[in-house]
């Protein structure tokens, strides 16, 4: 099948790796109006936008040279439509193509209009290893959490790990036990406690209990 790329997925760049793994099949289609938008971002007065735009142009170049998934640039435009996302939806409807995006709002609008959308962020989230309560991890606690005594760490894939009692272990590699996993719109958060921390707390409570 044909897949239309939007600006967000080009600038994100993971699409190149996806092509190289062979998970993407069919033809990747880059509409000229999307390419123009990436070029405009690359010419932006804001240095952050410029960097992202130039990265996007590099990604287009890499996609054209990867040789695994065919890439087409199409000139079809809808001059009566001004907004780029609306042009993309119109193109998808008129050609029966799917849209590859990272844009959550575009995905919502596409769903209403019966256009199939593949969201790379959702794919990345679904491929993360599943952790269950009771599993143990070795992690490096980097900083203080929001609540007293909490520490924060990150898994290799960027998932945030909140460690109860982790504040005392900042800067150290520590073994923790998963207590719960919370799914949020931006991904997963894993709540853990330090091995033996509960026993330590209970012992402390017993010690501090006033003797009757």
Image: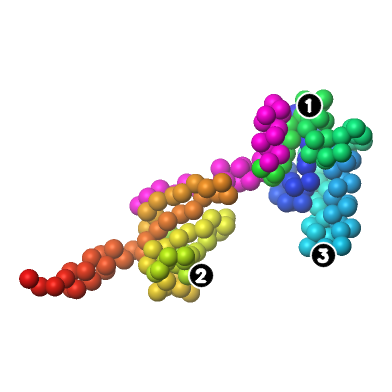
55, above or below 185, in the image: below
Alpha carbon separation for disc pair 3 and 1: 35 Å
Tell whether label 2 touches label 1 (CB within 8 Å): no
Alpha carbon separation for disc pair 1 and 2: 47 Å
Q: Is residue 22 visible?
A: no
Magenta-tinted stretch:
105-134
Which residue is label 3 attached to? 47
Mark 1: which secondary structure?
helix
99, above or below 206, in the image: above
Residue 163 relative to residue 19: left or right? left
Q: State the image coordinates of residue 87 (x, y, percent, origin top left).
A: 83, 35
Mark 2: which secondary structure?
loop
Whichever of callouts 1 and 2 sits on the residue coming sooner in the sequence is 1
84, above or below 160, in the image: above
Which residue is label 1 attached to? 93
Image quadrant assignment for residue 86: top right
Residue 187 relative to residue 29: left or right? left
For image coordinates 82% across by 65% down, the residue present is 47
């Amino acid at each position: 099948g044909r897949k239309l790329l939007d600006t967000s997925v080009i600038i994100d760049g993971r699409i190149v790796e996806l092509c190289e793994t062979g998970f993407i099949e069919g033809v990747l289609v880059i509409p000229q109006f999307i390419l123009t938008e990436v070029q405009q971002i690359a010419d932006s007065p804001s240095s952050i936008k410029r960097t992202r735009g130039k990265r996007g142009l590099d990604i287009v170049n890499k996609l054209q040279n990867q040789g695994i998934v065919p890439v087409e640039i199409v000139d079809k435009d809808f001059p009566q439509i001004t907004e780029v996302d609306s042009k993309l939806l119109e193109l998808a409807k008129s050609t029966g193509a799917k849209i590859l995006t990272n844009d959550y709002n575009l995905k919502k609008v596409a769903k209403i209009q019966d256009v199939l959308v593949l969201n790379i962020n959702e794919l990345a989230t679904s491929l993360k290893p599943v952790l269950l309560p009771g599993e143990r991890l070795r992690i490096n606690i980097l900083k203080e959490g929001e609540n007293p005594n909490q520490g924060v760490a990150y898994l290799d894939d960027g998932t945030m790990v909140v460690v109860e009692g982790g504040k005392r272990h900042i800067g150290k590699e520590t073994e923790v036990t998963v207590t719960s996993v919370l799914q949020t719109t931006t991904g997963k958060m894993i709540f853990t406690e330090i091995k033996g921390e509960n026993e330590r707390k209970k012992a402390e409570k017993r010690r501090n209990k006033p003797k009757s």
